[in-house]
Structures are given as C-alpha cells and as structure tokens.
Image: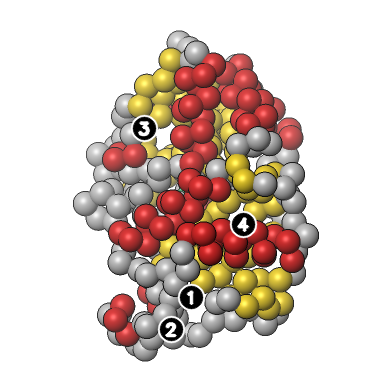
Amino acid sequence: QWIYLNGEFVSKEDAKISVYDHGFLYGDGIFEGIRIYDGNIFKNKEHLDRLYDSAKSIMLDIPLTIEEMEAAVIETLRRNEMRDGYIRLIVSRGPGNLGLDPRRCPTASVIIIVEQLAIYSEEAYRDGLVSVSVSQRRNIPDALNPKIKSLNYLNNILVKIQANLAGVGEAIMLNAQGYVAEGSSDNIFIVKNNVVYTPPCYIGALEGITRAAIMELCEQLGYKLKEEPFTLHDVYVADEVFFTGTAAEVIAVREVDGRKIGSGKAGPITTHLLQKFRELVKVDGVR
Ligand code: PLP
C-alpha cells in the first residue's frame, strides 16, 4: 500500500510525520473522506472544494493547487490499483515547535491514504441500525464552525465512545439548545407523512456531501423536503430515520432510545433513496 506523503509515495510502514506536526500536537488541520466507486471518484469536486474552503477558513495554505491535489489523488489511486474504496485526504499545519502559533509551521503536511472500506452489512442496510441519543453536544457556529472539517474530532469521538458504550453503530448528537444536529460522522434525516426533513447546518452539522446528494435526489424523485430544526421527539415519532455519509451512504435507523421507528425496518423512502444513491455513485464524479 502506497501513501502520498508531501509529494512522495512511501509504503504504509514508512509513512510517518514529525511529533512536532501541529496536526498531531493540536489537531491543527483539516481532512476529507471521499469514495471511489468502480473507478469513479464520487463528488470529487465537492470534496476538493470543501477541503480548500476548510483550509481557507482556518488560514491554512495548502501547498498544492486544487488541480495538483486532484492529480495527486488520482496518482495515489493508480499506484494502489484502487477502483473501489475510500480516499482520506489530510492537510495539517505541518511541523513547527511546541507552541500553538501557526506561524511556527512554515509548510503544511499533505497526506493521501487510500484503503478498502469496511462498511455496514447488507442486512444493516435492509433492517436498519439501532441508535441512541447522547449527552455530548455538537459545537455550533459560534464555537468551531461545523462547516470546517477539521482534525479536531474529539467531540465526535466522545459521541462514538457513548455509542460504543450503548453497543450501537451510530449515535445522535443534539446541539446546546436540544435540537437534533447529526451523528458522530453522519448527517441525519427523518421522514414524517411522506415529507423528508434534515436539520439546517447552522444547527450544528457538517455540510455533508452525501446529505446534499440526498437532498437533490429528493427533489428529483418528487419527495417534499424541508430543511428545518427538529427535536428528539420528532425522531421518536418519525415514520423513517436514516443517516447519510461518505462511508455509511444511506443507512436506515430502526430504533432510537428504545423507541421503534416506523415498521422497525428500513422504510420505503429510505430504501428508494439508497437505491437511487447507489445508481448515482456510478455516474456522478470523475473517472
Ligand atoms: N458529519 C460529520 C461530523 C462527518 O464527519 C461526516 C463525514 O464526512 C458527515 C457528517 C457526512 O458528510 P459527507 O456526506 O460529506 O461524508
């Protein structure tokens, strides 16, 4: 397995960065997770744009143009003979010294890892996940803007720990006001009376690229979609609940906090959206 590390291709064993890298010392950096399906980099442009927007927002200079980054991703895939899998792009502030001033880091570190992806089983897509809500609150725009896909994932990791303790695959995070925000690494949708709802990102959610694809699919398929805040009560009484994300795709939720959702299996709209999403991933991207 070849890893792209600052312009060079090194083996997995040799892919190492300095202990003085501020990505390691402070979580100072950003990342992206992208899927490749049968040689098609799904929503390539959207992911690269989000990466460069995140970088701009934290005043991080990526030492590659967006075109060079795309070429580096394609070369990493080629070297690994990867046609189906997951691409992790990481840009950290780079090595400096102790002290969090980013001016101490003259050059950002750029890393590209491509790997096979262990996703949920087909049964999980059919039967849905069990989920719980957790006490951890999502950071909101006046703290760290959730639009920045930063290397500071402690908040999400604490959610994951709570999910692990509850023995579930994904958990539901609220914001400080008690509105449903998202999962630890997925956006959330509910369906009630044939209307599809997802929280606006200002509630405290990453502007997910799968989320956007699903919103577009809803429009194309004629499902009414509302981007509005909702609470756990709305989740409990929803007809369908599902998560979306690059890794998870579209995964139904059959139970939340002990309340059975709808029929207790993946609902018809969720199933339809998953099917259409899987058709989309084959065509919408860069070959
Ligand atoms: N929310 C968080 C916190 C995430 O880390 C991710 C994963 O990238 C998502 C949502 C889903 O976003 P996307 O569909 O762009 O992968």
Label 1 Cα neighbours within 10 Å, binned few <14 / some 14-19 / many ≥20: many
Among numbered discs 3 and 1, the one appearing first in the sequence = 1
Location of residue 175 with respect to 13 vertically, above or below: above
Among numbered discs 2 and 3, the one appearing first in the sequence = 2
Among numbered discs 4 and 1, the one appearing first in the sequence = 4
State which quarter of the image contains the N terminus. Answer: bottom right
Label 2 Cα neighbours within 10 Å, binned few <14 / some 14-19 / many ≥20: many
Q: CA distance from mark 4 to mark 2?
A: 23 Å
Which residue is disc 3 drawn over? Answer: 199
Label 3 Cα neighbours within 10 Å, binned few <14 / some 14-19 / many ≥20: many
Q: CA distance from mark 3 to mark 1?
A: 34 Å
Which residue is disc 4 drawn over? Answer: 87
Horizontally, residue 10 falls left or right of residue 95, namely: right
Ligand 1 closer than 8 Å to the CB at disc 1? no
Look at the numbered disc 1 and give the secondary structure of its residue.
Answer: strand
Front one among 102 and 229: 102
Front one among 184 and 28: 28
Of badges 2 and 3, nearer the viewer stands 2
Percent across and percent down for residue 151 are 43, 64
Which amino acid type is shown beneath numbered disc 3? Pro
- The residue that appears at 51% across and 47% down in the rendered structure is 45
